[in-house]
Image (cartoon, rainbow, N blue to C red):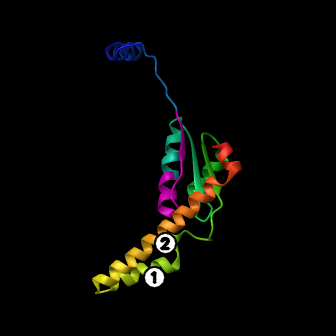
Amino acid sequence: MASKNSCIVTVALLTLLGVEMIFGAKILFIPINMYSHVLYFSRLAADLAQLGHVTRVLAPSSARIPEFVKNLENGGGNFSYTTYRVSGKEPFAECRNTSEAIMRMALSQSVWEKFRIATSLMKGFQKHSESDCVHLLDNDQLMKQV
């Protein structure tokens, strides 16, 4: 087993000789069912793919596909975007009921009501997130690909 110093010397020699060391990784991104997470994870995956990594985004089917992803998929390359089926047509965090509850909480003067609404939202988010995970893990075909 090589010591730390010999590894540093080896890298330094290869750098001095003009030999580039290239390391690539296969990276899987699984954002939660929120558009912001899908957007940011997809952007990070796309950028890492341009740097030579092989990246794949596994996103819930109810989340909007970022516009730049549609353009990237046509080009192929090291980036791929796959969806898995979840319950519901839209993410819990972005549905009308959630938005209304957040507005009620923001406008309320009652600390108790704010606490009650926040607790309800957290329970709903947890329930939907768990359901999304179960859908993903129960998808045998997709799990074999992963």
Q: Is residue 66 visible to the viewer in this orientation of the structure?
A: no
Magenta region includes residue 32? yes
Read off the residue under disc 2: 124
Q: Is residue 68 above or below residue 110?
A: above
Three-letter code, disc 1: Glu
| Quarter placement of the N terminus | top left
Which numbered circle lies on residue 129?
A: none
**Residue at horizontal 63 percent and vertical 56 percent from the top:** 83
Task: Give the image location of residue 17, x and y in percent.
Answer: 41, 12
How packed mark 1 is, by other alpha carbons closer than 10 Å (few <14, some 14-19, many 20 or more), is few
Q: Is residue 7 visible to the viewer in this orientation of the structure?
A: yes
Q: Is residue 122 above or below residue 65?
A: below
Three-letter code, disc 2: Gly
Say which of 21 and 107 sits in front.
107
Q: How many marks?
A: 2
Magenta stretch bounds: 25-41
Among the two numbered marks 1 and 2 on one chain, the one whose residue lies closer to the N terminus: 1
Read off the residue under disc 1: 100
**Are the residues at dot 1 and dot 2 in contact (C-beta closer than 8 Å)?**
no
Q: Nearer the viewer, mark 1 or mark 2?
A: 2
Say which of 95 and 136 sits in front.
136
Task: Give the image location of residue 26, x and y in percent.
Answer: 55, 37
| Quarter placement of the C terminus | top right
Quarter of the rendering containing residue 110: bottom left
Task: Give the image location of residue 140, x and y in percent.
Answer: 69, 50
**Residue at horizontal 46 percent and vertical 78 percent from the top:** 99
